[in-house]
Image (cartoon, rainbow, N blue to C red):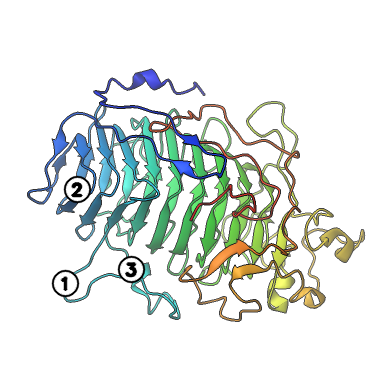
Amino acid sequence: MKKLKIAFFSLSLFALASCSKHSDNAVVAPPQIQVGQPISNAAPLTTNSYKGTMLAGQTYTVNGDITVNAGDTLLIQKGVTINMGKGYNFFVNGTLISLGTSDAPTTITYPGPVSNPRVKTHGAISTAATDSAYAGGWGGIYCSVTCKLLVIKWTHLDFGGAALKAAPFPAPTLSKAGSQYILFFENPNGVLIMEDSWMYGSPDDATRFYGGAMNIMRNTLEKLGGIGGDGLNAKGSSYGNMAYNLIIGGATNGTKTASDNTSSTECQFTMYNNTYVNDGFRNTGVPGARSGSIEIENASRALAYNNLIVDCAYGLRIAAGPGGAKVFLADTLANTSGYILKTAYGYNYYYADNAAQASQIVPNGLIQPVVTHPQATDIPNMKAFLTNSYTFGFVYDGTPLVGLNNPQFVNYTLPNLNFATQASVDSYDFHLKSNSPAIGKGTTTAFTPITTGIPVNANFGATEITAPGADMGCYQSNGTGNHH
């Protein structure tokens, strides 16, 4: 894939500066930029095409679908709040950039009716039947094959996923009426950057990607999927990195790759230093299929390292299909070309609060075939626990592993038997205590992130492509990683 050239932006920019870091690892936000003319918030925005800049700190009301035409750019400055009406979307044929900052995030949300406002609930039991987070409010950001760049930085994407009323783009689009994604991207020659942002609440897959170079880092995902749906769902010929994300209470998988609907390169991602908590307990589909933390399937390739997986229904799952959920074999062979030559995994850290979870650290093939091999570098050492006589896919009794290797979160007591319904961060703190056994147990040398085609730029690319960290999960004791 050709590398994106920043020169394709023929924009009127008032300021442009790169991001730097002090030695204390505090992120310094670049000066705000403006593209084109300011967009007024004096009246609600209705169904129309828009370009220019939503100005810092202002609140916009949207009562229609927002379209960004090919060749145009819509930029959202820091501190902007966009209150979306029920079911309305962004349809992006050009470029969309949201530049929130750590001290002034941007928010795109569905506030709900005055009589029944949509608010984030904390400390409550969260189920698909009782929690409005899974109902869908506004629609999503749908990017077509002509969208060259989508940048989401320090941005809250709350209560999205209302079903599309009609297909927003002509063929060969893969989005269609009824789709319920918050982020959709399908340009194999485009770039998607999502970093330091939040997603809260969706009825189905929060994201669906069919092509493009992507860097998805340091985000927090909560309550994604009602009775099914993945958090970060990459398909087609999309490739890149998913790292340092906190994914809690997802219906199905936190991160997934699958080479569906592509005739070009396979879907290829690194998945490293993510923290998965309480994922996989709202999937009402085929039991034992696509339910847990990490899924690699359908001729895709991935590298999965340094992930912290706590009280999830299943551990890392490499599908061997075909099976009841129409899942097919991941590419586990050695290749001579590509961003990832061969699927590989290890140095992942597991904690389980009951025997059912512990018996799926290495998922079995009772319902659907899997080819996940036990790894000696994992914690616990599943290769030693299962011994050399183990054949992948066999059922085993994980009871002796229950409660072992507590990662010692700063403020989240384990054991915690509310794993099926605790789906949001609330006031908990998933950083690691200084005495955590997960500190220093990762690898920083076994692999490198994908950099090809991913621009690094304060405004028009990734702020940084964060290298693998030595500590398990998304929070690093040296202050790098997830900043939430």
Mark 2: few/some/many CA within 10 Å (<14, 14-19, 20+): many
Q: Residue at x 49, y 37 (%)?
A: 214
In the rendered image, which quarter is residue 416 located in?
bottom right
Q: Nearer the viewer, mark 2 or mark 1?
A: 1
Label 3 element class: loop
Is 159 placed left or right of 307 in the picture?
left
Occupied quadrant, residue 368 = bottom right
Tag in front: 1 or 3: 1
Instruction: Point out the residue furthest to the right here.
Output: 388
Mark 2 / mark 1, whichever is N-terminal = 2
Q: Which residue is mark 3?
A: 135
Residue 104 appears left or right of 266: left
**Which SS class for mark 2?**
loop
Q: Residue at x 64, y 29 (%)?
A: 338
437 is higher (above) or lower (below) than 88: below
Residue 62: image x %, image y %? 17, 52
Residue on which the image places disc 2: 65
- Kind of residue at badge 3: Ala
Ranked by sequence position, the earlier of labels 1 and 3 is 1
First-in-chain label (3 vs 2): 2
* 423 lies left or right of 51: right
Q: Determine which residue is flagged by label 1.
A: 114
Residue type for callout 2: Asp
Q: Is residue 113 above or below residue 337?
A: below
How dense is the environment of label 1, judged by Cα within 10 Å: few (below 14), some, or many (20 and up)?
few
Q: Residue at x 53, y 60 (%)?
A: 247
